[in-house]
Image (cartoon, rainbow, N blue to C red):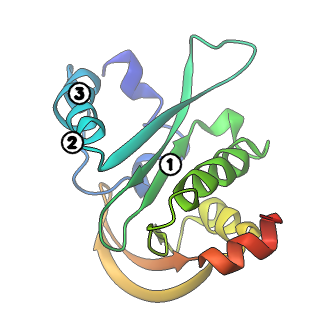
Amino acid sequence: MPTRCRRFSRGGIVRFLASNVPWPCPADGALTFIRDRVLPAMRDGTEWHWSIRSRQAPERLIGAITLMDKPENNRGFWLVPEFQGQALMSEACAAVTRYWFESPDRPVPHAPKAVANERSRRISEREGMRVVGTAERDYVSVRLREELWEITREEWRTRSGQ
């Protein structure tokens, strides 16, 4: 397995990856994803991608967070297990939600997530998001029950003091 893909294979990250993520990770998976999907979407202004890196080793990718102009799927993220529980993803989510709402014409952001993904659900709860729907969805690992979370601009402004 390619070195960069090993980060996904630990700690249940793979279990909660969307089914459109090629798995097992092909040898050129990261390059192909960036070249063929991320860069064109960023160029088109339909997706925004940020890497998450530690201050101690900024050259090492430890996670990512994405915003997308897709119906009922506007945010996704992952973080390697050894950096979870340190509020890094909460900080990243706060920053990208602020970025989302800086544009006055943005709709309510939606974040789908597996019910079994407790850590991700807790981040949304702390942000003030709420569940507005449920469904079944295919993930890389299996079909899982999924919740759709959202927060309105007004709720976000009240919580963030904006």
Residue situated in front as seen by the camera: 95 or 144: 95
The first of marks 3 and 1 along the sequence is 3
Q: CA distance from mark 3 to mark 1?
A: 17 Å
Q: Is residue 108 left or right of residue 87?
A: left
Q: Is residue 28 left or right of residue 101?
A: left
Dot 3 amino acid type: Gly
Q: Which residue is mark 1?
A: 77
Q: Which residue is mark 3?
A: 29
Q: CA distance from mark 3 to mark 2?
A: 8 Å
Q: Mark 3 and 2 residues: CB-CB less than 8 Å, in contact?
A: yes
Badge count: 3
Residue 99 lies, in percent from the top left, at: 57, 51
Residue situated in front as seen by the camera: 79 or 9: 79
Q: Secondary structure at mark 2?
A: loop
Q: CA distance from mark 2 to mark 1?
A: 16 Å
Compared to residue 12, the image places residue 115 above or below, namely below
Q: Secondary structure at mark 1?
A: strand
- Counting other residues with Cα less than 10 Å from the Cα at mark 2, is it few (<14), some (14-19), or many (20 or more)? few
Q: Which mark is residue 22?
A: 2
Q: Secondary structure at mark 3?
A: helix
Dot 2 amino acid type: Pro
